[in-house]
C-alpha cells in the first residue's frame, strides 16, 4: 500500500509540474502533430489520437515500473 501511495504522489507531482510549466515546452500536450483537428464554418472536430497514444505508453510504463518486484 505504501508503494502505491508513493507512486500516486509522484505521478501527481509530475502532472502538476507539466501543468505549471507546460506552456514553456516546445510542444503542447493535446496539440501534438498528428492530432486530428478539423474546423469548419459552424463546427469544430478535434480528436487527439497522438496524445492518447503517448499518454497510454507513458501510463503503461509507469504501471510496469510500479508492479515490478
Image (tube, grey):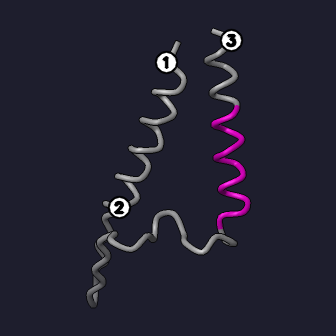
On screen, 32 above or below 42? Answer: above
On screen, 58 above or below 68? Answer: below
Q: Is residue 4 left or right of 21 when viewed as pictured?
A: left
Q: Is residue 14 left or right of 63 when viewed as pictured?
A: right
Q: Among all residues in the image, which is located at the extreme front? A: 69
Label 2 sits on residue: 50
Seen at 72% across and 52% down, the residue is 17
Label 3 sits on residue: 2
Q: CA distance from mark 2 to mark 3?
A: 33 Å
Q: Disc 2 or 1, which lies upstream in sequence?
A: 2
The circle drawn on residue 67 is 1
Seen at 63% across and 36% down, the residue is 11
Q: Among all residues in the image, which is located at the extreme top? A: 1
Query: Which type of secondary structure does the marked residue at label 1 adopt?
Result: helix
Seen at 30% across and 84% down, the residue is 39
Query: Which type of secondary structure does the marked residue at label 2 adopt?
Result: helix
Q: Is residue 30 left or right of 18 when viewed as pictured?
A: left
Q: CA distance from mark 3 to mark 1?
A: 13 Å
Label 3 or label 1, whichever lies nearer to me, is 1
Magenta-drawn stretch, dominant element (helix, strand or loop) = helix
User: Residue 47: horizontal and vertical position, in percent?
Assistant: 31, 64
Q: CA distance from mark 2 to mark 1?
A: 26 Å
On screen, 50 above or below 66? Answer: below
Q: Disc 2 or 3, which lies upstream in sequence?
A: 3
Q: Which residues are magenta?
A: 10-22
Q: Are marks 3 and 1 in contact (CB under 8 Å)?
A: no
- Image quarter of the N terminus: top right
User: Residue 40: horizontal and vertical position, in percent?
Assistant: 26, 87
Amino acid at each position: 500500500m505504501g508503494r502505491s501511495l508513493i507512486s500516486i504522489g509522484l505521478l501527481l507531482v509530475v502532472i502538476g509540474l507539466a501543468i505549471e510549466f507546460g506552456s514553456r515546452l516546445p510542444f503542447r500536450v493535446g496539440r501534438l502533430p498528428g492530432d486530428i483537428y478539423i474546423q469548419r464554418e459552424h463546427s469544430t472536430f478535434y480528436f487527439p489520437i497522438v496524445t492518447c497514444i503517448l499518454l497510454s505508453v507513458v501510463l503503461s510504463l509507469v504501471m510496469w515500473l510500479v508492479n515490478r518486484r
